[in-house]
Image (cartoon, rainbow, N blue to C red):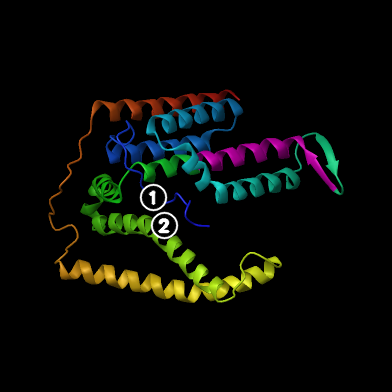
Amino acid sequence: MFKNIIIGQYIPGTSMIHGMDPRAKLIVVFVFIINLFIANQFVSFSLLTLYVLGAFFLSKVPIRFFLKGLRLIAIIIVVTFLLHLFMTREGEPLFSVGFLTVYEGGVKQGAMISLRLFLLVVMTSMLTLTTTPIALTDGLESLFNPLKKFGVPVYEFALMMSISLRFIPTLLMETEKIMKAQMARGANFLHGSLVKRVKAFVPVLVPLFIQAFKRADELATAMESRGYQGGAERTRFRQQNWRGLDTFVLLTVVALMFIVLALRWLS
């Protein structure tokens, strides 16, 4: 059930996206998210979709693996579209389904919000799929380094974000193991009403929380036993190297932002 979750996972590779500086990838994703919330026309969303497809093609992430990981997200996207479809009452009415009426504004808004959510998930997933947790930590620390002057614990914050991302697939695997163990003892998670299935899942939470705290304690003990001190002028095995490729990709997403802004202003 959870083996195809892509959030927090890393796929080793030698693609152009893999070779980019983690700082550049973080900035590109941040600017792209801004573009998503600025866009308000299908022309803008078409350009953003082409940008994501191009990035996905260059990342060389297996498409079958990626699509399997989007199954749960697809349910959320479909529900989001249906909510906007039937709850938004703007524009001309198109047709009725029983006591529900579908309006032109509902179709447009539902499609735009759903596409925005889809592109957001794809772009952020490619960040973790093509960047190691250590590289993400180093990139975040480097970008937030000016905040050290204001007493912000930059390294601890970056490390916390990295560990959180890395723990997502680990906790999902633990959840699957616990569910299989309980199914072997007669628990039923797949049949019955929704209420019954939710009640059957409740006993999974207790051992899952215990295992999560146990792993966190083991990680803290291992770091302390090795004399770990965050941010104490630590050296790095892999040095960050900003190249011309990183500048070019950043300029493309910034140029895309100006185009999206122009299309929004002209609308």
Q: Which amino acid is tagged 2?
A: Pro
- Label 2 neighbourhood size at 10 Å, few (<14), some (14-19), many (20+)? some
Where on the picture, by quarter, is residue 254?
Answer: top left
Tell which circle, 1 or 2, labels the residue nearer the N-terminal end: 1
The circle on residue 169 is 2
Q: Is residue 53 magenta?
A: no
Q: Which residues are magenta?
A: 100-120
Residue at x-position 52% and y-position 35%: 38
- For this orientation, the residue located farthest to the right is 98
Task: Specify the amino acid type for callout 1.
Answer: Gln
Q: Which residue is mark 1?
A: 9
Residue 147: where, in percent of width, then height?
26, 51
Q: Secondary structure at mark 1?
A: loop
Q: Is residue 105 magenta?
A: yes
Is residue 151 rendered to the left or right of residue 250?
A: left
Label 1 with label 2: CB-CB less than 8 Å: yes
Name the residue at 53% across, 57% down. Answer: 1
The secondary structure making up most of the magenta span is: helix
Above or below residue 32? Residue 2 is below
Q: Is residue 62 left or right of residue 77?
A: left
